[in-house]
Image (cartoon, grey):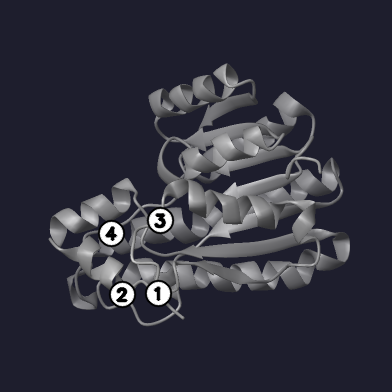
């Protein structure tokens, strides 16, 4: 059996750390040439070096998801470097301090919108154009959250933007399915990332509470979330589109 992403060109945002870095490493191991995008160049270079040492093909581009020109340029860079675009994982995101709706500042709300929703929309538009112009067929996966699947009083703005990402995903799947472009999302649960660690610092005991509410009784490793994204992007998921796949250890079962 061939590797999941054999001979694919992949774009990964938020690829300097956490789930995005794990995805970039996995996609390369599974045969893809990977363009990593994020704001912090040192982190990107470290991950690219790891991939190359392991025998994979990767490069990086600095990208700020809040900057429309930066997003479009990053996607175009994949085509410039590797000649085409086949698949994309829109993973990059930001967060705000937990708290009720009336405690969310306008600054934080706007930033969450610019990065977590508008940035994903801009990336999808650019990715569809690149896939159309080069490979003709392909797949996109957006990283959502189980916090988007129900009311989210602790992170109301974050949850709202991720729920909107789910809607964009479903709409795009309907629009581009006839062209052979599949669009799905994953909804990770409690995962060992810097974002969860920051939330734990604001709400001590959070991770233990989340683990207690998870049937698998542990946090996910970022690599486990990346596996779900890789499968959805691969041809082995060829009849899957328009889905928001929970990867949460059963927490929302």
Disc on the earlier residue, 4 or 1: 4
Q: Report the residue marked by disc 3.
A: 220
Q: Judge whether 131 appears above or below 167 on screen.
A: above
Please tell me which of labels 4 and 2 falls first in the chain: 4
Neighbourhood count class around disc 3 (C-alpha, 10 Å): few under 14, some 14–19, many 20 upward = some
Q: Name the side, left or right, on which 49 lies relative to 201.
A: right
**Residues at circles 2 and 1 in contact by the CB criterion of under 8 Å:** yes
Q: Position of residue 243 (x, y in %)?
A: 65, 71
Q: Earlier in the sequence, mark 2 or mark 1?
A: 2
Please name the residue that numbered disc 1 is placed on: 251
Numbered badge on residue 213: 2
Q: Would you name the residue on which mark 4 appears? A: 108
Residue 167 place in picture, x, y as percent:
58, 74
Q: What percent of the width, then of the height, locates residue 25?
A: 55, 34
Mark 4 vs mark 1, foreground winner is 1
Quadrant of the drawing holding the N terminus: top right
Cα separation between marks 4 and 2? 28 Å
| Mark earlier in primary sequence (2, 3) | 2
Residue in the image at 21% along x and 64% along y: 208
């Amino acid at each position: 059996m061939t590797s999941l992403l054999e001979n694919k060109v992949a774009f990964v945002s938020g690829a300097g750390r956490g789930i995005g870095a794990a995805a970039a490493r996995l996609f390369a191991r599974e045969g893809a040439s990977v363009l990593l995008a994020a704001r912090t160049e040192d982190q990107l270079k470290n991950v690219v070096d790891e991939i190359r040492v392991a025998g994979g093909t990767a490069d990086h581009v600095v990208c700020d998801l809040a900057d429309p020109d930066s997003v479009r340029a990053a996607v175009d860079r994949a085509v410039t470097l590797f000649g085409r675009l086949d698949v994309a994982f829109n993973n990059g995101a930001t967060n705000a301090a937990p708290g009720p709706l009336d405690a969310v500042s306008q600054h934080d709300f706007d930033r969450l919108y610019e990065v977590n929703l508008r940035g994903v929309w801009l990336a999808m538009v650019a990715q569809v154009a690149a896939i159309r112009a080069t490979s003709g067929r392909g797949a996109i996966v957006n990283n959502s959250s189980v916090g988007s699947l129900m009311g989210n009083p602790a992170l109301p703005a974050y949850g709202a933007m991720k729920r909107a990402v789910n809607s964009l995903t479903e709409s795009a799947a309907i629009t581009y399915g006839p062209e052979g472009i599949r669009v799905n999302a994953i909804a990770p649960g409690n995962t060992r990332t810097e974002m969860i660690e920051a939330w734990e610092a604001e709400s001590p005991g959070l991770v233990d509470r989340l683990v207690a509410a998870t049937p698998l009784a542990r946090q996910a490793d970022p690599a486990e979330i990346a596996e779900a994204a890789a499968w959805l992007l691969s041809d082995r998921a060829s009849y899957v589109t328009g889905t928001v796949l929970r990867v949460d250890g059963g927490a929302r079962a």
